[in-house]
Image: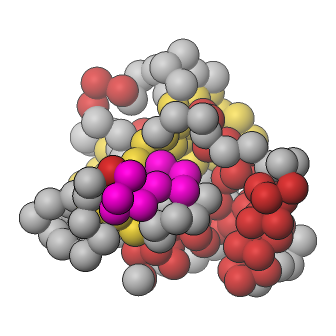
Amino acid sequence: MRTFALLLALPGLALTAQTACAQDKAAAQQIAEAVSALPADMRAGARVLGYSGAAVVTLRDGSNGMICLADEPGDDRLHVACYHESLEPFMARGRELRAAGKSREEVQQMRLAEIEAGTLPLPERWAALYTLTGGTFDADAGAIVGGRGNSVIYVPYATAATLGISEQPARDRPWLMAPGTPWAHVMIGG
């Protein structure tokens, strides 16, 4: 469940209020960190969103349909995420609601209501999300080293019956988390 909570919170983490934020990381470092979550062959084509103070800005345009979000400044945890562009309305809405001071539960409830009302679109097909948490940025390697990666595939409203994938958590095989919900997703390796 901890991973599920992280995935629900992830879109909202991007624009939380910053207090005593240290000097912004250089755009080049934010880009290198952000794309570290992706498989190597997908990194060069990803669009990258990063931070200028507390504001989310585009650091680099992309060409392969993937969007990477840089590490949020102001905390001691290194965390980056990349997802398919079809998830951007869902992710951006989460960031917007969190910036407005909404709790994780409020964000979840509001997005669900908007999805059900047809005002917040979901991907029409499966969509991947990759995260990398922990580790450190190695300037020589130009990437995060030592972090823990996680990969999921969003399959809105999927169930074990519609996919033939178990809902029981496992580290050695894919499994379905949050079945039957708009944010149902197949967990891969974690």
Residue 140 in view, yes or no: yes
In the image, residue 36 sits, relative to residue 134, either above or below, namely above
Q: Quick one: quadrant of the N terminus?
A: bottom left
State the residue at coordinates (79%, 58%). 116
Q: Going by the image, does 1 lie left or right of 156?
A: left
Q: In the image, which residues are magenta?
A: 154-162
Q: Which colour scheme is used?
A: secondary structure
Magenta stretch contains residue 161: yes
Measured as percent of width and height from the top left, residue 97 is found at 83, 67
Seen from the viewer's position, the closer of residues 134 and 190 is 190
Q: Which residue is drawn at 46% across and 67% down?
A: 179
Does the magenta segment cover residue 46?
no
Residue 68 left/right relative to 22: left
Pick out the residue farthest to the front. 161
State the residue at coordinates (57%, 65%).
181
Write the residue at 49% across / 60% down.
184
Q: Is residue 72 visible?
A: no
User: How far across and down, in percent of the image, does residue 58 sit?
Assistant: 70, 35
170 or 50: which is nearer to us?
Answer: 170
Q: Which residue lies furthest to the left in this view?
A: 172
In which image quadrant can residue 11 be found?
A: bottom right
Where is 170 relative to 163, above or below?
below
